[in-house]
């Protein structure tokens, strides 16, 4: 997959720089053409000769590098690049990339290139959690820079925290994934729902649920990356920064129903990952209820949105978040809601479910069940799309 690809490996000044020698070697073994750029700080941790020996290319260490035979190094490299990887990426380099401070060739190359950028942060845990680093990472995410890790583990300081650079083998597989990304959803118009809906009791109080919307966002991103035109209809989200999709914010299940019904005839696919409130308050109070005046609430059923959509006109994918009888309940939902696929997940499993970045799911469809291991929601999103694709003519 990465054979003959021009990969620029940017190494910055972190103790994790030694891992990038292994990464360079793995890339070369896969027949990629690897061009390394190092900062002065990186040279304090690992030697230039290790990289030039492995890649058979001179290492760029500064704008005024006299050894290079290229015209203007960072421009030549930028134009040829198929991918730029910054590993390890220090807090300093992340800030410079976010702000476009091109005082050394790594940022210069990134600015002058149209290639995708993947960064692997590595630093102390508190540095990583600092507002400045988190803000800079958000900026990079908005610029569609892919961020891998950091992972939790023992840091150079001896503490166990998030800050370890993603291991080279994992980075290699993420790089391969970038090149293998199919555009198999070109010309597909998809509605994705995400997050929890809310049902107001009075102007102050409401009923809602624990959904963070992370799974729906991961699906919307994966669809976008695979070429689909995506409309994301969402309730409460823990992170609303997704770009490249149409976003429609709603509050109640009724709002979501209306937004979907207005569009459903013009779309090919709907993936309902939203946690829709099953009940609303029968007579919503227009004024704040005084606590003495409330002894019980009368509820009435909300429409089942997924069930109400005609499955002969659009591909329907639903979710089943369960605490017991996972497969049995998911199969019931597959048939009563007339879906092609139900993504079933047991929300009681550790590391899985609401708010988590990972999920463990079983794909339930007419031909059987596929039990998947615990994985990142972004990875699961692609698995769901791989399966869904088989239902699209
Ligand atoms: N769903 C929907 N409209 C509702 C409730 C749920 O469209 N009023 C969708 C969800 O988005 C999900 C699927 O139906 O894709 C299953 O939702 P879930 O909450 O697991 O099941 P329910 O149908 O609400 O049944 P129960 O709560 O009894 O498990």
Image: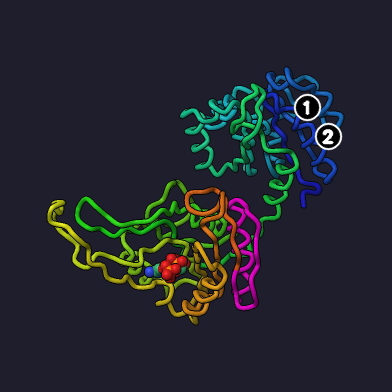
Residue 227 image position (x, y, % from top left): 58, 60
Residue density around tag 1, few if under 14, some if 14–19, many if 20 or more, within 10 Å: many
Where's the C terminus, which quadrant?
Answer: bottom right
Image quadrant in which you'd find residue 390? bottom right
Image quadrant in which you'd find residue 180? bottom right
| Kind of element beneath mark 1 | loop
Query: Which of the two residues, 104 or 26, is positioned nearer the viewer here?
Result: 26
Query: Which of the two residues, 361 or 220, is positioned nearer the viewer here?
Result: 361
Image quadrant in which you'd find residue 144? top right
3 horizontally vs 215: left or right: right
Q: Residue at x 42, y 56 (%)?
A: 195
Residue underneath mark 1: 59
Query: Compared with residue 232, is residue 82 higher up or lower down, i.e. above or below?
Result: above
Image disc number at residue 338? none
Residue 7 image position (x, y, % from top left): 74, 40
Give the residues drawn in magenta, as a range: 364-393
Residue density around tag 2, few if under 14, some if 14–19, many if 20 or more, within 10 Å: many
Q: Are marks 2 and 1 in contact (CB under 8 Å)?
A: yes
203 horizontally vs 315: left or right: left
Query: Compared with residue 202, is residue 35 higher up or lower down, i.e. above or below?
Result: above
Find out whether residue 383 is within the magenta segment: yes
Q: Residue at x 79, y 25 (%)?
A: 68
Residue 171 appears in view: yes
Residue 48 image position (x, y, % from top left): 80, 23
| Kind of element beneath mark 2 | helix
Residue 234 image position (x, y, % from top left): 40, 57
314 horizontally vs 277: left or right: right
Residue underneath mark 2: 55
Q: Residue at x 69, y 51 (%)?
A: 177
Q: CA distance from mark 2 to mark 1?
A: 9 Å
């Amino acid at each position: 997959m990465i054979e003959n690809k021009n990969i620029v490996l940017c190494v910055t000044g972190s103790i994790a720089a030694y891992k990038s020698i292994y990464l360079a070697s793995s890339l070369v073994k896969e027949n990629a053409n690897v061009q390394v750029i190092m900062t002065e700080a990186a040279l304090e941790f690992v030697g230039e000769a290790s990289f030039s020996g492995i890649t058979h290319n001179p290492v760029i260490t500064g704008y005024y590098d006299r050894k290079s035979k290229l015209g203007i190094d960072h421009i030549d490299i930028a134009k040829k690049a198929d991918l730029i990887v910054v590993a390890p990426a220090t807090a300093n380099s992340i800030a410079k990339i976010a702000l476009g401070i091109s005082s050394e060739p790594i940022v210069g190359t990134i600015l002058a290139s149209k290639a995708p950028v993947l960064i692997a942060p590595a630093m102390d845990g508190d540095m990583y959690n600092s507002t400045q680093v988190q803000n800079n990472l958000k900026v990079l995410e908005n610029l569609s820079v892919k961020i891998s890790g950091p992972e939790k583990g023992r840091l150079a300081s001896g503490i166990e925290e998030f800050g370890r650079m993603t291991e080279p083998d994992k980075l290699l597989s993420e790089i391969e994934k970038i090149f293998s990304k199919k555009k198999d959803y070109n010309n597909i118009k998809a509605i994705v729902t995400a997050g929890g809906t809310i049902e107001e009791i009075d102007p102050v109080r409401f009923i809602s649920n624990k959904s963070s919307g992370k799974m729906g966002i991961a699906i919307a991103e994966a669809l976008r990356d695979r070429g689909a035109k995506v409309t994301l209809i969402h309730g409460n989200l823990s992170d609303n920064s997704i770009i490249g999709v149409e976003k429609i914010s709603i509050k109640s299940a009724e709002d979501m129903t209306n937004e979907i019904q207005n569009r459903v005839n013009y779309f090919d696919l709907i993936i309902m990952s939203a946690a829709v409130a099953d009940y609303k308050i029968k007579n919503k109070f227009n004024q704040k209820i005084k606590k003495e005046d409330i002894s019980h609430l009368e509820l009435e059923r909300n429409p089942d949105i997924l069930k109400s959509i005609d499955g002969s006109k659009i591909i329907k994918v639903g979710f089943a978040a369960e605490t017991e009888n996972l497969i049995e309940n998911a199969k019931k939902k597959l048939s009563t809601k007339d879906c092609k696929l139900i993504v079933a997940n047991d929300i009681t499993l550790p590391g899985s479910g609401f708010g988590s970045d990972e999920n463990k799911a079983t794909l339930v469809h007419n031909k059987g069940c596929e039990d998947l291991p615990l994985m990142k929601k972004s990875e699961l999103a692609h698995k769901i799309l791989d399966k869904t694709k088989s239902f699209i003519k």
